[in-house]
Image (cartoon, rainbow, N blue to C red):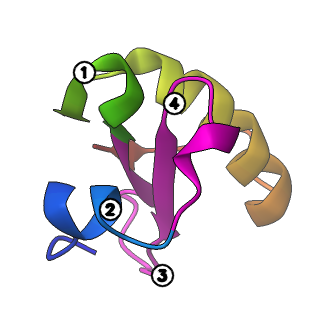
């Protein structure tokens, strides 16, 4: 997940014409430690001039409810 970079996203086979703003990549982390994140995310928005946004809160506003349902949790810890 950490090895994915701007070049691999922006020069991939993704059809960027279908995206308004960008792409959020997420991954669930499986750990019994409550201090570890439940999921991690990265945001790439080359169409709007953002190679990678390391602190976009809007990505977590969309991702958190999704993962809360998937993981059956009411409280999540996330990392970007």
> Residue 60's mark?
4
Between marks 2 and 4, how big is the CA–CA gap? Answer: 19 Å
Mark toward the viewer: 4 or 1: 1
* Cβ atoms under marks 2 and 4 closer than 8 Å: no
Vertical comparison of 76 with 29: above or below: above
At horizontal 51% and vertical 30% (from top left) the residue drawn is: 60
> Mark 4: which secondary structure?
helix
> Mark 3: which secondary structure?
loop
Between marks 3 and 4, how big is the CA–CA gap? Answer: 18 Å
Could you tell which of marks 3 and 2 lies nearer the N-terminus?
2
Does residue 38 appear in the picture of this structure? no
> Residue 49's mark?
1
Tag 4: Cα neighbours inside 10 Å, few (<14), some, or many (≥20)? many
- Observer-nearest residue: 75 or 45? 45
Which quadrant of the rendered structure holds the C terminus? top left
Vertical comparison of 10 with 18: above or below: below
Between marks 2 and 1, how big is the CA–CA gap? Answer: 14 Å
- Residue 16 lies in the magenta stretch: yes
Could you tell which of marks 3 and 1 lies nearer the N-terminus?
3
> Residue 9's mark?
2
Mark toward the viewer: 3 or 2: 2
* Residue behind mark 3: 30
At horizontal 40% and vertical 61% (from top left) the residue drawn is: 34
The magenta span reads 14-43
């Amino acid at each position: 997940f950490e090895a994915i970079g701007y070049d691999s996203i922006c020069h991939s086979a993704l059809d960027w014409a279908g995206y308004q703003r960008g792409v959020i990549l997420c991954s669930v982390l499986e750990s019994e430690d409550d201090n570890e994140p439940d999921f991690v995310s990265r945001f790439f928005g080359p169409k709007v001039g953002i190679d990678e946004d390391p602190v976009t809160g809007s990505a977590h506003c969309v991702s958190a409810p999704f993962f809360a349902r998937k993981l059956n949790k009411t409280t999540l810890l996330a990392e970007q």
